[in-house]
Amino acid sequence: MRADTTRLDLRLRRRSLIGYTLGMALYAFIVVALYPSFKNDASLNRLTENGNTVAALFGATGSLTSSSGWLNSNLYANFVPLIVLLLAIGYGAASIAGQNEDGTLGLVATLPLSRRRLVAEKFATMCLQAVPVALVTMLCVLAGPGFELHIGIGNLIGTTVGVLLLAIDFGALAMLIGAVTGSRGTALGITSAIAAACYIISSLAPVVDWIHPIRFASPFFYAVGDGQLLRGLSAGWAGVLAGVAIVLGLAAAEAFDRLDVH
């Protein structure tokens, strides 16, 4: 029964998941393939001189012609997290609140599974949905040496794990808000607003003095905003992200126990 529940949710979203994965793979490969054309362009680095806040909003800080700077500004500081967040938050909001609104959650709740077990299965499904985009992007970046782009494999794997944990955190938040309110729209709106605020904090922290001290309030900082492509994902930062996911998942299970299912 557990496998059937997971399989059903994944099947319902397979087209969007495949589309996002293929689209991200194409974009990531183009970014990698274009690097030789820009690696010696000194004018590109002028975009980030003197703490340019506009460039920072798009994840561009430091040297844009280095391998890590190029990948960060074109992939890992913005587009990769955006896509995995779209998938995770969308599913998190729909998995409980969305099904409650369309009347299918009541049928699912009649299965011989406890509510906590059901939330655990949906949490696992959400985690699985975040994997393809992040994994395919990493595989495309591994082709980098053929295009003069060099990133340590350990650092790349760590950054990929950080992106996955980031998606799980916000997906779990959407699931929690959906379980509390029973409203898919509310879960999507609040979670998206919080994610946007956290992204801005992490992006501007390197160039705006008064934001720098509050960077620790943003999950983006722990996942991709602390030079993970250069230094890898530290065990401490991974622990913070994993801890947030666990707390939010347990809270979602508790909230679902109290939800009046239609």
Image: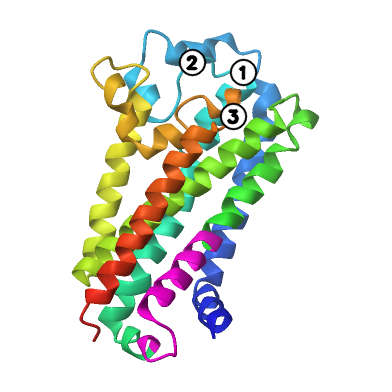
Secondary structure mostly seen in the magenta stretch: helix
Alpha carbons under labels 2 and 1: distance apart: 9 Å
Q: Label 2 is placed on what type of residue?
A: Gly
| Residue 82 horizontal/vertical position (percent) | 44, 46
Q: Quadrant of residue 149?
A: top right
Q: Residue at the location (58% across, 55% down)?
A: 131
Quarter of the image for the C terminus: give it: bottom left
Q: Label 3 is placed on what type of residue?
A: Gly
Q: Which residue is mark 1?
A: 66
Q: How many numbered marks does the figure carry?
A: 3
Q: Residue at the location (22% across, 76% down)?
A: 259
Q: Which residue is mark 2?
A: 62
For the residues labelled 2 and 1, say whether their Cβ atoms are less than 8 Å apart.
yes
Could you tell me if residue 152 is visible in this image? yes
Q: Label 1 is placed on what type of residue?
A: Ser
55 is higher (above) or lower (below) than 222 = above
Relative depth, front residue between 246 and 184 = 246
Q: Quadrant of residue 59?
A: top left
| Residue 183 horizontal/vertical position (percent) | 22, 70
Q: Which mark is nearer the camera, 1 or 3?
A: 3
Mark drawn on residue 232:
3
259 is higher (above) or lower (below) than 212 = below
Is 42 on the left or on the right of 246, as rendered? right
Q: Residue at the location (37% across, 8% down)?
A: 50
| Magenta segment boundaries in residue numbering | 108-128
